Amino acid sequence: MLTREIMVQLFPESAQFVDSYLPFLNAVTDRYQINAPRRQAAFLSQVGHESAGFTMLLENLNYSADGLAMTWGMRFSEKDSSGKYILVRDGSRLRRMPNSDAQLLHRKPEAIANRVYSDRLGNGPESSGDGWLYRGRGLIQVTGKSNYRACSLALFSDERLLITPQLLQEWQWAVASAGWYWASRRVNVLADGDDFERVTKAINGGLNGHAQRLKVYQEALSVLG
């Protein structure tokens, strides 16, 4: 069983929330057999990363133009005639040069969500507002209308999350949705193996933040093992 001490050790920033989420966390890890050290360490590292250390249950899309260029380079970065990103020096590092779209969407989170999540994940076009309505929520950042529908059917046997997606900002459903997502993608099987990159790809779709996830995974293994 996960304890308050374990969670605060791994995610000290969540100390103010731990008593609210811990009962639900233990119930979900029990229900979905996230019960061996490798499984628990993998689960905690992934949902911890997605939720900024068990402190955020709603996706922050307040990107600057530079942030858009770094996060969604294909959409928001300038490229040269050969199709390569144009890089500019920022102090000691290089960053991608934002394009005109990035400049227009600078610090406009609703418009950003409607742009980047349009016509995908079951969402309608940009004008539908689905991108903003079904932006990432819960510990694992359930995103997109189709995922909200599937999650709702699994948790409630109806489609209430399409009407009240804000339910995933409540600790009970934030944690439950993470358990559902984990189980629906059979991540326990991946966590039992030795390739942690496959776990990250199953959750993230890529390797964004993988080094940070791996660091927490290793710390969690030490604490739990």
Image: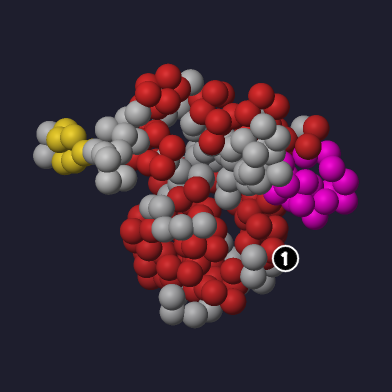
**Among the 4 quarters of the image, the one containing residue 13:** top left
Mark 1 nearby-residue class (10 Å; few <14, some 14–19, many ≥20): some
Identify the residue at image location x=41%, y=46%. 12
The region drawn magenta spans 145-161
Identify the residue at image location x=59%, y=69%. 187
Instruction: Tell me if 123 is positioned left or right of 61 in this view.
Output: right
**Among the 4 quarters of the image, the one containing residue 110:** top right
- Display coloring: secondary structure
Q: Is residue 172 visible?
A: no
Quarter of the image for the C terminus: give it.
Answer: bottom left
Identify the residue at image location x=34%, y=40%. 70
- Above or below for 65 versus 210: above
**Which residue is at the far left?**
92
Instruction: Tell me if 141 is positioned left or right of 80 in this view.
Output: right
**Among the 4 quarters of the image, the one containing residue 179:** bottom right
Q: Which residue does the numbered mark 1 point to in the structure image?
A: 31
Overall secondary structure of the magenta stretch?
A: helix
- Above or below for 129 versus 154: above
- Rendered location of residue 10, percent (x, y): 41, 55
The foreground one among 133 and 176 is 133
**Residue 155 lies in the magenta stretch:** yes
- Rendered location of residue 123, percent (x, y): 69, 38
